[in-house]
Amino acid sequence: MPSVDVTYYANNPYNAHHANEFTSSMKPDLNALFAFARVAHHRSFRRAALELQLTPSALSHTLNKLEQSLGLRLLNRSTRSVSVSDAGARLLASLDPALTKIGLALEVMNEVREKPMGRLRINVPRAAAQLVIAPRLADWMRAYPDVQLELVTDDALIDIVAQGFDAGVRFGESLQQDMIAVPIGPKLAFSVCAAPHYLALHGVPKTPKDLLQHACLQYRFPSGTHYALEFQSNKKRMEVNTKGQFATDDFASLIRAAIDGAGICYTYDAYISELVAQGQLQRILQNWYPAGERMYLYYPSRVNLPLALRAFIDFFIDSSTHA
């Protein structure tokens, strides 16, 4: 039988004060069965008690309760020796394979406590996956080869606990108050852009309110609402609810439409920087842009935080220091 993490059982003391009060109508618990197996293995209450970090009297009390619960004598004992009864031998023959499996399971848990491993499920908006996670994904995979990272891209606000996720990523204003949140990745800034030929034909807006006179390409949330364009002037925020002929929840389609001259697009600056450099798009209203903000990785509790999630948090917090 492989070694078992006895501290797991030692944290559930077998003593007269805390022992479970078994009755003939109750089933014995795992702790009592494990205690019996260790006494049977050592043929000694003293050696078994030493392994379990208990007093021999407390262990004897637990075994007495177990025998009373089963209505059977499991151990023959005198002041000098201990042996297993026929009923005890039959029980032990069935217990050993089960306790072996439990021991192996606990050894796996010890491995999980020692290094990041296993599956890590994180719910992220598509922009976060593309702009925050993807640029460092290869580095993460090389650093933590035993973690199976599963990113589920979803722009809808969901209950990550109910949906079985370890964590989620969102902007700060979208976070629920009962969540633990840490900023990750670089600051993400928005830009307003249009194709040069669109601006030559329709004119360049001078203020955010001028957008109301233009064809604006709408970003649509999964809820069905359209994104209100955010601007800032003299540290004061303002929103402009624009209207347009085309709406989608896909930034790539909005940008493609802007390149083709269909209207003005409000999107993440990182998506369009190369297109601006190539002359396909032109930034407008640059004096009105709000400051960039970081995404937040959020999770429900700090208690017994999975080591893989702890590693993920530390890795991407560290990446933000280079932004």
Image: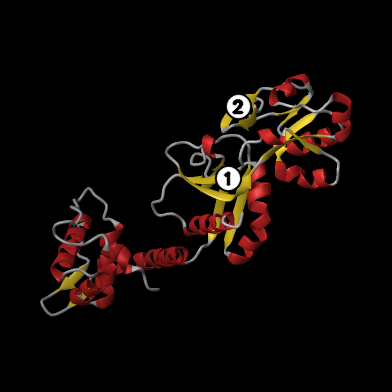
Name the image quarter holding the C terminus. Answer: bottom right
- Name which quarter of the figure residue 248 lies in: top right
Q: Is any part of residue 145 visible from this angle?
A: no
Q: Up-down: is 175 above or below 19?
A: above
Q: Can you identify the residue that label 2 sits on?
A: 238
Q: Within 10 angstroms of label 2, few (less than 14), some, or many (20 or more) residues?
A: some
Left or right of 206 in this view: 120:
left
Kind of residue at badge 2: Met
Q: How many marks?
A: 2
- Report which quarter residue 123 is drawn in: top right
Mark 1 or 2, nearer chain start: 2
Looking at the picture, tell me which residue is in the foreground, 233 or 228.
233
Query: Is residue 254 positioned above or below 272 on the image?
Result: above
Q: Position of residue 68 (x, y in %)?
A: 17, 57
Mark 1 or mark 2, which is nearer to you? Answer: 2
Is 168 placed above or below 316 here? above
Q: Distance between the residues labelled 1 and 2?
A: 19 Å
When asked about the image quadrant of residue 228, the answer is top right
**Image point (60%, 34%), residue name:** 156
Query: Mark 1 highlights which residue?
Result: 294
Local secondary structure at mark 1: strand
Q: Residue type at mark 1: give it.
A: Arg
Furthest toward the bottom, the residue is: 80
